[in-house]
Amino acid sequence: MAKPGLEEFVAAKIAAGHVSEDDVITLRRYIYGDMAVSLAEGAALFKLNNAGLDYAGTWYELFPEAVGDILVHQARPEGYVSQESADWLIGQITADGRICTRTELDAVLHVLEKGPGGAGEPRAVRPKGRCKVSHLRNGRYPVGQRTETRRHCRW
């Protein structure tokens, strides 16, 4: 469960229409204050990201870092992304009906870089997740549809 105050802070930033450098520092304190990042905190970050605000430059560092920490370092077993976590990430990315903003793509790539195996790719994300990432990167991921991704991807 998210810490008291994070949802209110996110709502206030959405109402204000921008996220400043100081706001990013405050978000870091909310998220990393207890040295753990939760899915609820990740969902709050996605909500803020999906609002399409004016963001300070440090937002583009915080967002992928936090999402990577949630999925690779906080979930068990550490260092791996479960299918459930991969589905959560894809669900968060496609929830707003838009396909992969800059920060969302950076977050996916950050997750792929942080995990073990090959070029840092978390095992549960392979190969299905890589294919989904490929579709997201190319703007072709069908929101709200399930497709047989292996037919559409080249390894």
Image: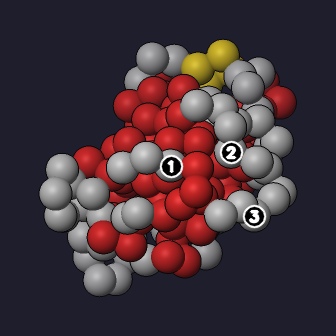
The span from disc 3 to disc 2 (Cα, nearest Å) is 9 Å
Can you tell which quarter of the image residue 96 is in?
A: top right
| Nearest to N terminus: mark 3 or mark 2 | 2
Residue at label 1? 153
Q: Nearer the viewer, mark 1 or mark 3?
A: 1
Q: Is disc 1 surrounded by few (<14), some (14 to 19) or many (20+) residues within 10 Å? A: some
Q: From what the image shows, is residue 29 above or below residue 121?
A: above
Residue bearing mark 2:
141
Across and down, in percent, residue 72 comes to 33, 65
Across and down, in percent, residue 121 comes to: 27, 57
Helix, strand or loop status at disc 2: loop
Amino acid, disc 2: Tyr
Q: What residue type is labelled 3?
A: Arg
Q: What residue type is labelled 1?
A: Cys
Q: In which quarter of the image is the N terminus?
A: bottom right
Horizontal side, residue 89 vs residue 61: left or right: right
Residue 52 visible in this rendered orientation of the protein: yes
- On the image, the x and y values in percent for residue 80 come to 30, 72
Secondary structure at badge 1 equals: loop
Q: Residue furthest front?
A: 151
Residue designated by label 3: 146
Q: Which of marks 1 and 3 is nearer the N terminus?
A: 3
The answer for how far apart the CA atoms under marks 1 and 3 are is: 15 Å
Query: What percent of the width, then of the height, locates residue 154?
Result: 43, 46
Q: Can you see residue 45?
A: no
Helix, strand or loop at label 3? It is loop
Q: How crowded is mark 2: few (under 14 residues within 10 Å), some or many (20 or more)?
A: many
Q: Are marks 1 and 3 in contact (CB under 8 Å)?
A: no
In depth, the one of 116 and 73 nearer the eye is 116
Decide which of tag 1 and tag 2 comes sooner along the chain.
2
Q: Residue 62 carries which label?
A: none
